[in-house]
Amino acid sequence: MRQILRLSTSKQSLSILLGLTVFFLVLTFGKLDDGNPRVTYTLAIALLMAIWWVTEAVPLAVTSLIPVALFPLLGIMNGKDVSSTYFNHVIFLFIGGFIVAIAMQKWDLHKRIALKILMFTGLSPARIMLGFMLAAGFLSMWISNTATCMMMVPILLSIMSKLEDKIDKEVVQKYSIGLLLGVAHGASIGGIATLVGTPPNLSFARIFQVMFPEAPEISFAQWLFFAFPIAVVIFIFCVVYLYYVYKPKKNTWNEIDKSTFRREYEELAPVTYEQRIKGSSSSTLSL
């Protein structure tokens, strides 16, 4: 154990030293633009952050705050302008989305939504795949697609174990690959549909506002009307393709008892006050 700790400590030290070495070499010898040394300074900071970010030599939160200290120090930007870029409405929307995701997971609201959709879609192979992808896509419309996958996979694993009890394991293994891919792709597709569905959407809206300040701001409704139909088309194609590739043969599939998902749902107990609040807060966040 001590040897492992020593190795990790030495790697961190080497990574820190490597980042600082590259930083000072670019500052000293780099000349990207003779008339504007700030270009070289920015590159040096970017390389320092990239090395520390990839190697995790220091905590990621510390690496992300390097520009707050070095940009004013090297005269690239003043402290007020740098700080304002860290605290804008997009960043707070990020934070709000993560808080809602954590709250939904804490109070099992994601399980309730997923099981409700599965109870509605049915228990055939096509309907189970559609149900999981629909649940992942719907959840991902309001919270991060990464968080959605983390929420959906435990539910999927429990359903897969029930399938293995009733069906041949080899059949279930092939079908399970399709289900896992379906959850991942469903979450990614659902993230396209809304502005808060995935961080790159918000990043695009912020970059668009910075690059084209005179253009009208992209609102939640505008994004929804544009992206939702596209997401629906991609979703339908993805469901059909994954089912066609990973569907089990008819003679190898035994229908699951219809009460399976209902029993899972009833084990969650009645809807709590916290679940009602989290469900309403996710829609409020999107506005």
Image (cartoon, grey):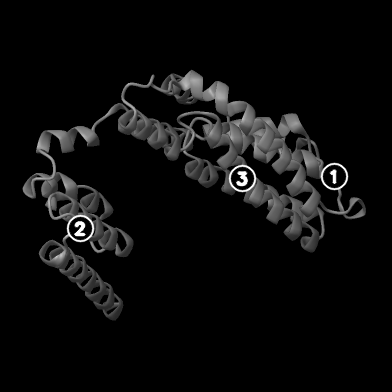
Q: Nearer the viewer, residue 64 or 122?
A: 64
Q: Give, as a three-letter code, the residue at label 3.
A: His
Task: Give the CA distance from mark 3 to mark 2.
Answer: 42 Å
In which quadrant of the rendered image does the C terminus lie?
A: top left
Q: Nearer the viewer, residue 207 or 181?
A: 207
Kindly state the secondary structure of the residue where label 1 is placed. loop
Task: Give the CA distance from mark 3 to mark 1.
Answer: 25 Å
Residue 32 tag number: 2
Mark whose residue sits in front, 3 or 1 = 3
Kindly state the secondary structure of the residue where label 3 is placed. helix
Which percent across, then down, holds residue 215?
Answer: 37, 22
Give the mark, 3 or 1, whose residue is nearer the N terminus: 3
Q: Nearer the viewer, residue 37 or 268?
A: 37
In the figure, residue 257 lies in which quadrant? top right
Q: Give, as a three-letter code, the residue at label 2.
A: Leu
Does 64 sit left or right of 100 as displayed? left
Mark whose residue sits in front, 3 or 2 = 2
Point 62% across, 31% down: residue: 230
Give the mark, 3 or 2, whose residue is nearer the N terminus: 2
Point 73% across, 29% down: residue: 120
Q: Does 97 appear above or below 245?
A: above
Which percent across, then down, holds residue 142?
Answer: 49, 30
Mark 2 Cα-neighbour bin, 10 Å: few <14, some 14–19, many ≥20: some
Q: Nearer the viewer, residue 144 or 270?
A: 144
Residue 255 tag number: 1
- Mark 3 = which residue? 185
In which quadrant of the rendered image does the N terminus lie?
A: bottom left
Q: Give, as a three-letter code, the residue at label 1.
A: Glu
Answer yes or no: is residue 268 visible.
no
Contact (Cβ within 8 Å) of mark 1 with mark 2: no
